[in-house]
Image (cartoon, rainbow, N blue to C red):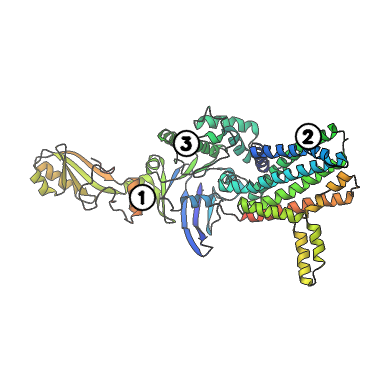
Amino acid sequence: MKPGIRGIAVNTFRESARNKMFYLLVFFGILFALSSKLVSFLTLGDAMKVLKDTGLAAINFFCVLIAIFTGINLVYKEIEKKTVFNILSKPVSRDEFIAGKFLGLALTMLTALGAMAVIFFAFVAVSGGGFDLGILLYFVMLYLELLVIVAISLLFSSFTTPILSFIFTVSLYLIGHVMWTYNEFKDYLAIPLWRAFTQGLYYLLPNLHKFNIKNEVVLGMAIDPWSVLFSVLYALAYVLAVLALTVLIFRRREFQ
Amino acid sequence: MKALEIKGLKKSFRSNFLIRKYNILKGIDLDVEKGEIYGFLGPNGAGKTTTIKCIMGLLSPDAGEVQVDGRPADTAAARQRIGFLPENPYFYDYLTAREFLLFSASLFNIPEKEARDKVAALIHRVGLSGHEDLKLRKFSKGMIQRLGVAQALVNDPDLLILDEPFSGLDPVGRKDLRLLILALREQGKTVFFSSHILQDMELMVDRVGIILDGTIRRQGKLSELVARSTQYVEVVCDRIDRRELARIHPDSTVRDNQFILTLASDADVNLVVESIIHNGGRILAVNPVKMTLEDIFFSEMTGGANGIPTSRSNGTGAPPDPATPGGKP
């Protein structure tokens, strides 16, 4: 890895790691995951399933929140506070800057998710459950989803304000989770042109639903390994495409 | 080969929904020799920072070229040899001074051990010893400026580009920075800095470029610019009757029982001096009063070619007001 990219990545990670908001969100993620025990007491049915279901949902929610909130500020803050001048005036290209920022945030998310995952595994073990490989796979898939969200928020952060970045990223996140409905919807369109357009949009928008294997994990259903492999490749391709677009936009930016 | 060479640099910005175009740089041509201190002088809004941002690749010029040591300025090889301090710098406030400098060094691919030694030396050199492990959010503006200078030196650059480096510094800080810049010249470094603080510039620059409204109005050695610009000649004398003096030269003032005659720069000074002596007077001094950098600057600003600026005298041959900075006795 180029030293410039590594330096920026480490610094980005350090920035997040010294942000109180980061710790607050990780803390609440863990708190809500642990409170799933309480929910399992109040619910009829398999207590372990309820614990896993609500616990994983809490971790998912707070990790997505961390990814969006950190990502939307990432480049914008550098430009707004002019700290970017200090980096881009050195032998660091704009492409390396974006790559470093993304990797730094990817490391941040790995740390946040890793901390929550370790505590959750320990909690499940204490509650009488064994080690579940499915849950580990769930966390891997969640991490891939977080990488896509981080890339998207980074893209918006490179050319617009945090508020608009938040609206755009959350919108894409929500759309990304109902893509299966969207796919069905396009079949009802009568006009071929509209159908083609909708089909194109389907491939363009992030299909985050692919990464959600919570039901399979909680209910103990079989997980198709090919589907998992496809999701991994999809995440990597999508992240690379979004980063390439970010770089193209960022190369043209003027710093007045 | 020049340390820095700018040819035909143009830059415009659009505003009002891209309707109106503002030409900020209208064709900048300047060159900086190796090993000199070059002062880039201009009022606010003249285009100093825009020029510097074009040099550093933070803005893309509409036209023109910028070369550093014969290489295009926007290449990594050129940047490797440049140290840059932006105007009103702001650095990551969650870092300590040491961490920030190490981060800056990492961007130049300086090995960590070497970087640690360099950073320790730089902290001492810019007068931040004892504050190296303090978070930058606790730094004053002057300390940030000192740190900015340190990060500009972290790669031991051949060319230093400093945008308003004296801004925010107290008199001690300004003096320290002046000495540091002079020491860097002694080491063979080239320093290009912008400022509107004339006093600092006059004390240290070898050459100066005056930018006004996006064009370079004057460029040259400070000593030559100043030497060419004799404003007027003062003749100080005493022991002469005032009426006699009035016949020799009508324009005189009295200060501490001494007469001060103000002659135009092209007047026959010898004739006046001889006449005074001939009439029993005593010559105490003959002072050619030259334009200061400030005078030259204001002369350019007010459109005067080489005339006596309004800030120093009234330009009618009357003596300058001793109370004004230019009213030298």
Q: Say whether mark 3 and mark 1 are on the same chain.
A: yes
The label nearer to you, 1 versus 2, is 2
Dot 3 falls on which chain?
B
Residue ID for mark 1: B297
| Residue appearing at x 55%, y 53% in the figure | B59
- Res. B142 mark: 3
Provide residue A82's location: percent of width, then percent of height: 55, 46
What is the distance, in whole Å, between disc 1 and disc 3 at their CAs? Answer: 27 Å
Dot 1 falls on which chain?
B
Dot 2 falls on which chain?
A
What amino acid is labelled 1 in the image?
Phe
The label nearer to you, 1 versus 3, is 3
| Residue appearing at x 89%, y 48% in the figure | A223
| B326 lies left or right of A35 | left
| B209 lies left or right of A64 | left
Name above or below for residue B86 compared with residue B211: above
Provide residue A225's location: percent of width, then percent of height: 89, 48
Looking at the image, which is closer to me, A144 or A208?
A208
Q: Determine the image quadrant of residue A43.
A: top right
- Res. A99 mark: none
Quadrant where the C terminus of chain B sits is: top left
Name above or below for residue A166 compared with residue A125: below
Label 1 CA crowd tier, 10 Å (few <14, some 14–19, many 20+)? many
| B229 lies left or right of B16 | left
Provide residue B98's location: percent of width, then percent of height: 58, 32
Residue ID for mark 2: A119
Looking at the image, which is closer to me, A9 or B203?
A9
Mark 1: secondary structure: helix
Provide residue B113's location: percent of width, then percent of height: 64, 31
What amino acid is labelled 3 in the image?
Gly
| Residue appearing at x 81%, y 49% in the figure | A212
Looking at the image, which is closer to me, A209 or B122?
A209
